[in-house]
Image (cartoon, rainbow, N blue to C red):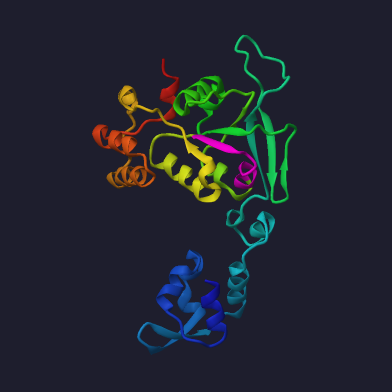
Amino acid sequence: MKDYLQKIRAGQPINYAAFLKALPADIARRHSQLFQTTRVSAQRWRVAILDEATFRTLEQRAITPADRVAAASQGDSHRQRNSHSFLLVYRNSTHQHRRQQEALRPDVVILSRQGAEQGFTAKPAVLVIENEENFFHYKTMLAFASDCIGRHLSLTNCDVVLGGGARISSENSLRWLAGYQAVYTAFDYDGGGLRIYASLVKALGDKVHWVQPKDWQPWRAAFRKAPKSTERFTEAVRLAEDLGFGALAAMFSSTGKFMEQEMILDD
């Protein structure tokens, strides 16, 4: 929208139909009261400003906000990411074991553009787990990952982080993950999990590893999640193939289903 506004202000012709699509809905609905147009060529219109106050408001809204507070002052805080975020991390510590579950309380890492604040030294490796249930069963997940990669992982050599959704692929999180020598990813075996993995590989390179069984056949019955659409299913198969996970793509195709990582916890 900013480019259109600058051209209107300079008296240059624009694609008016495309401009209307870029406008906020409340403004677009009354565009005829705010602008007067003169056609100068195919798909090009010169636009006269009828309401200077509203136009100045649009110019302010088109400025990229510096932070979340500035975005809120422009009417939509979601236009800018939070300046701080956090991650939950299990690591080898002296925390007291709780109840009979002997579960450790995870540490909190505070992330910002200035860096990370954490009360521990990172291990050489980290296991990123997508879903909360699996994260709190970190011992089972470490054992599963160890079996998959053929290397013993425990809290003595590997931190465990909860990284569901877009949280782990944010700029701050990626900067933090870059400090590890190896990043193992345990995500749902579906299009969403593959997309997150691909984003980490794009940012961090070959230090990122996809955790999956060496042989998918014993896990065939665990593929139970029906795709929400044919398009999403097709995309997941293609993405698995593009990433070099032919056996996983074949399992998608033969079952017509995805596997949620909670199935790893199913006895």
Q: Is residue 119 magenta?
A: no
Instruction: Judge left or right: residue 155 versus residue 223.
Output: right
Q: Nearer the viewer, residue 27 or 207?
A: 207
Residue located at (63% from left, 70% from top): 60
- Location of the C terminus (image quadrant): top left
Asked if 71 appears above or below 161 in the picture, the reply is: below
Q: Which residues are magenta?
A: 173-185
Q: Nearer the viewer, residue 55 or 236?
A: 236
Can I make out residue 100 in this image? yes
Residue pictured at 68% horizontal, 50% vertical: 83
Outermost residue, left side: 254
State the image coordinates of residue 136 (x, y, percent, origin top left): 56, 23
Q: Is residue 183 magenta?
A: yes
Q: Is residue 187 left or right of residue 77?
A: left
Give percent across and percent down for residue 226: 31, 34
Q: Looking at the picture, does residue 138 appear above or below residue 101?
A: below
Q: Quadrant of residue 207?
A: top right
At 40% from the left and 28% from the top, the residue drawn is 213
